[in-house]
Image (cartoon, rainbow, N blue to C red):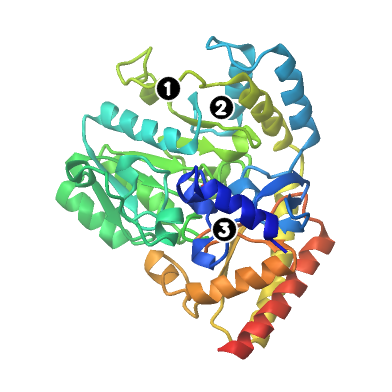
Amino acid sequence: MYERSLEEYRRACKFLPGGVNSPARAFSSVKENPLFIKKAEGSKVYDIDDNEYIDFIGSWGPMLFGHGQEEVVTAVEEQLEKGTSFGAPTIIETEMAQEIVKLVPSIDRVRMVNSGTEATMSALRLARGYTGRDKVIKFTGNYHGHGDSFLIKAGSGPATLGLPDSPGVPGDLAKLTISVPYNNKEYVEKVFTEQGDEIAAVIIEPVAANMGVVPPKDDFLKFLREITAANNSLLIFDEVITGFRLAPGGAQEYYDTEPDLTCLGKIIGGGLPVGAYGGKQEVMDEVAPVGPVYQAGTLSGNPLAMAAGYQMMKLVQKEGIYEELAEKAGQLVEGLNEIQAEVELPLNINQVGSLVSLYFTDQEVIDYETASTADTDLYADYFQGMLQKGIYLAPSQFEAMFISLAHSEEEIQNTIKAAAEVLKELEQTI
Ligand code: HOZ
């Protein structure tokens, strides 16, 4: 079924570390070899063995409207004719920025970069430059890309591979990152009481989506807003996943809490490499060339990425799309809940908007500690069973399911049916 993918994987391993360009793509934790994808369309991906799958990875988030969205493809094609990169200002950068500023109220000025990692690294440098402080609070199991200051108790690939702290991160730098349990106010308060005047920023995924999906507790984000303001620290929302996924204004609109800085990526590029960070003018004016905090990039604001992103910014303003996304995800979750009631398996489901996680644990998942109680072997079996039935899930218990507008009701029902069969088979094995 996956012969050609296996062949290509073996060849890739001779030239690429682990055969992949990002560890999250390796299927090691689900005891499989990665599929090599040849094309994608709407809600589907197709591998080089000609297998067709309903795709719930969606390129790890950007494909809010499914693959090959018409306006996005046309805009990229048109831009290709004109040139792929100039290393000079273009009008489309301003237009894109203007849309972001319009949609995300906490952003007055935005700087385009090339990835979510670059956005978070740059936002932290800016927070350090602006406050004149060095320490940062992050949350255990949150993943902010692979910048040195963030590979401390990180979720996503590091959690999947059991490498939450990476060698190569200088110990002296790692000491400046204080890792705190997600959703734990007392812990945050304690850190601020002891070291408040040294904290440049608190960075958070406002909905954690790199240890599976974990919503913030009731007023946790508002609490962070208050405690950072009281201590003259900045609040950074890493909205690389949640930006334009939960609402046009992201998680900050969804939870009505404004950060000082916001990091974006994924959806704002419609599948092209892009990232961005932005915030209030007073803070963003510290960035070069206006201010002294240096950050730059040859391909920043790349015209192809901006052309795609601009169309995405227009599309997310269509009436009713977020309701439709949540409804689709709700149908999936309703189906999974029904299965959960029927099978004797430790299962827990989290959903926020179009982000869903099925955890193999009987504990409510509220942070990394509870997420870690999930049985990753059971997830691996579930993943393999679903794959055989044509459902392409993230190859890790600690990643989200991304529902898109391209998923039809029939595909959602087929996914539920497949999950029921796989989970009932799994029940027999434990
Ligand atoms: N943030 C994504 C995983 N949660 C990125 C995928 C990758 O690291 O390749």
| On screen, residue 221 above or below 29 | above
Disc 1 to disc 2: CB gap under 8 Å: no
Numbered tag placed on residue 77 in the rendering: none
Residue 355 at what x, y percent from top left? 61, 57
Select label 3 or label 2 by which is in front: 3
Between disc 3 and disc 2, whose residue precedes?
Answer: 2
| On screen, residue 407 above or below 72 | below
Q: Which amino acid type is marked by label 3?
A: Ala
Residue annotated with mark 1 = 281
Q: Which residue is at a point 49% across and 65% down the rendered structure image?
A: 29
Q: Which amino acid type is marked by label 1?
A: Gln
- Is disc 1 surrounded by few (<14), some (14 to 19) or many (20+) residues within 10 Å? some
SS for dot 1: helix
Q: Answer yes or no: is residue 226 visible.
A: yes
Residue 180 at what x, y percent from top left? 30, 57
Quarter of the figure with residue 70? top right
The residue closer to the viewer here, 281 or 28, is 28
Residue annotated with mark 3 = 400
Real-space Cα distance between discs 1 and 3? 33 Å
Real-space Cα distance between discs 3 and 2? 27 Å
Q: Which amino acid type is marked by label 2?
A: Val
Residue 407 at what x, y percent from top left? 77, 54
SS for dot 3: loop
Q: Answer yes or no: is residue 402 visible.
A: no
Numbered tag placed on residue 101 in the rendering: 2
Q: Is 126 displayed left or right of 410 in the figure?
A: left
Q: Which residue is at a point 68% across and 28% down the rendered structure image?
A: 308
The residue closer to the viewer here, 325 or 93, is 93
Select label 1 or label 3 by which is in front: 3
